[in-house]
Structure formats: structure tokens, C-alpha cells
């Protein structure tokens, strides 16, 4: 069973989000389904997105955690059995460990797809990229007059980011900007060292996840 961004409950909520529809969890879920799940052998269920009402969640599942700021957001997971919580930051894995078996899997992107948007010459200086709500956490090191790239579908965002020398972003957006040859600016007090955002391809992440699942479940599918 796979619960993802196409689930009716998620889609109903997604349709009401306006520009916030184009968020990291949505696009990460798409890449998990397209590039990671087909390359991982397991008998477990998959949950790649959080449903608003949490009413259709299987036991024995691999659950991707997208909210790194509020771990209690996932307290509902404690009522499900034998779940593995996949977290994109070590700190998140630690914070949600009370709700299930948590593991750290570095955030990953479809590197080849992002590379299609690289340009030979950058024509703009600096921009913030991401949802506007994240600007509330911006550090004073991010200039107030930077351009704002938000409310865009992913390919449109990649096309725009590629024009900039410096991008203020976190998470997968920062990783994508790195691939595009942008310098990563610090815009969140939690991540003062941009080197935390390593370039990892979805297929590489699938191999990492397979290894961890084999160790946890005591199964080797090779």
C-alpha cells in the first residue's frame, strides 16, 4: 500500500492551499514515488505524505517525515505498529524517535533533472527561494531587499534560481540551488552552515534506505 500526494484526502487539502501547493513535501513525495520506491525491495507499506486527518494509515509502514520544526506534529504515529520513520535531518530522527523506529536518510533530489536547468552565465545577484512562511525564520544575514522566488511550480523555480549567484534557501531547495551552481546563503538560524545540504541523488538515497531496511528487518533481497 502506498499513501502519497495522490491520495484523495491529501489532494482535497492540497487544492485549497493556493501558491503553497508547490511545497517541498509535495515534490519530495513525487520523487520518492517515482525514483525511490521502485528501487527499494520491502514488504512494508509506504507513507510519503502526511494526511490532514490521519485516518488512512497502515501499520508496518515506511513513513517519510517532512516537518523538521515541530516533531509533535507526528505524535499520532505512536498509535500505529511497526513503523519506520524516515527523517531528513539527524535531529528530527532523534526528536520523533518516541513515536516509532526513526532513521536518518539524507534529503535527496533528482540530480539529472535539476541539471537540465543550469545556465552558462548568471545574470542576477541574490534571491530567497521557498514558501513565504519560511521568511518568518529568516536570519538578519539575509538582506531584506533580495528577490523573492515563491509560489512557483518546481520547474519554474529551478529555471529562475539558475539565474542567481546566491540563493537563500534550506532543505531540498538549497540542494537544488547547489546543483545549479548557486552559493547558498544562510536564512535559518538552525542551519548556519550551508554545507549541511549535501547533494544526494534519489537513486543513491534508495540504496542507503535499502541497506538500512535490510538491517532493521533482517532481510537481504540481493
Image (tube, helix red, strand yellow):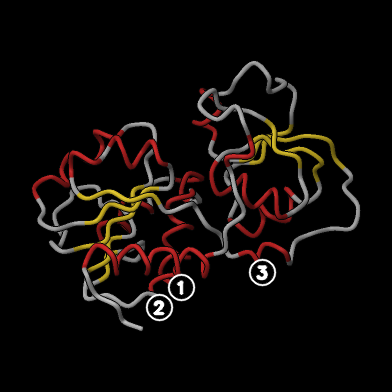
For the point 31% across and 81% down, the residue is 221
The answer for how far apart the CA atoms under marks 3 and 1 are is 14 Å
For the point 48% across and 52% down, the residue is 106
Is disc 2 placed on a helix, strand or loop?
helix
For the point 55% across and 30% down, the residue is 191
- Numbered circle sitting on residue 34: 1
Q: Is residue 46 above or below residue 194?
A: below
Is disc 1 placed on a helix, strand or loop?
helix
Using the rendered view, name the quadrant where residue 166 is placed.
top right
For the point 48% across and 49% down, the residue is 24
- Numbered circle sitting on residue 38: 2
- Numbered circle sitting on residue 134: none
The answer for how far apart the CA atoms under marks 3 and 2 are is 17 Å
Q: Does the residue at mark 1 contact the one at mark 2 (Cβ under 8 Å)?
A: yes
Q: Is residue 112 above or below residue 98?
A: below
Between 216 and 34, which is closer to the camera in this rendering?
216
Between 117 and 86, which is closer to the camera in this rendering?
86
- Numbered circle sitting on residue 112: 3
Q: Is residue 17 above or below residue 32?
A: above
The answer for how far apart the CA atoms under marks 1 and 2 are is 7 Å
Residue 50 locus on image (x, y percent): 29, 51
Residue 217 locus on image (x, y percent): 21, 67
Residue 205 locus on image (x, y percent): 48, 63
Q: Earlier in the sequence, mark 3 or mark 2?
A: 2
Badge 3 crowding class, 10 Å Cα cut-off, few under 14, some 14 to 19, many 20 or more, is few
Amino acid at each position: 500500500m502506498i499513501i502519497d500526494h495522490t491520495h484523495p484526502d491529501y489532494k482535497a487539502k492540497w487544492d485549497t492551499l493556493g501558491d503553497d501547493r508547490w511545497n517541498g513535501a509535495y515534490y519530495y513525495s513525487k520523487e520518492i514515488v517515482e525514483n525511490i520506491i521502485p528501487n527499494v525491495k520491502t514488504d512494508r507499506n509506504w507513507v510519503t505524505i502526511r494526511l490532514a486527518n490521519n485516518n488512512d494509515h497502515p501499520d508496518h509502514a515506511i513513513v517519510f517525515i517532512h516537518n523538521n520544526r515541530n516533531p509533535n506534529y507526528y505524535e499520532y504515529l505512536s498509535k500505529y505498529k511497526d513503523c519506520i520513520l524516515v527523517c531528513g535531518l539527524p535531529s528530527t530522527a532523534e526528536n520523533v524517535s518516541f513515536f516509532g523506529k526513526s532513521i536518518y536518510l539524507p534529503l535527496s533530489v533528482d540530480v539529472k533533472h535539476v541539471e537540465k536547468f543550469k545556465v552558462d552565465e548568471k545574470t542576477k545577484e541574490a534571491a530567497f527561494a521557498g514558501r513565504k512562511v519560511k521568511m518568518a525564520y529568516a536570519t538578519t544575514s539575509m538582506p531584506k531587499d533580495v528577490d523573492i522566488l515563491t509560489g512557483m511550480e518546481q520547474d519554474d523555480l529551478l529555471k529562475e534560481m539558475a539565474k542567481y549567484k546566491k540563493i537563500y534557501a534550506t532543505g531540498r531547495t538549497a540542494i537544488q540551488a547547489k546543483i545549479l551552481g548557486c552559493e547558498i546563503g544562510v536564512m535559518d538560524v538552525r542551519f548556519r552552515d550551508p554545507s549541511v545540504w549535501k547533494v544526494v541523488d534519489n537513486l543513491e538515497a534508495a540504496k542507503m534506505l535499502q541497506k538500512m531496511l535490510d538491517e532493521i528487518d533482517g532481510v537481504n533481497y540481493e
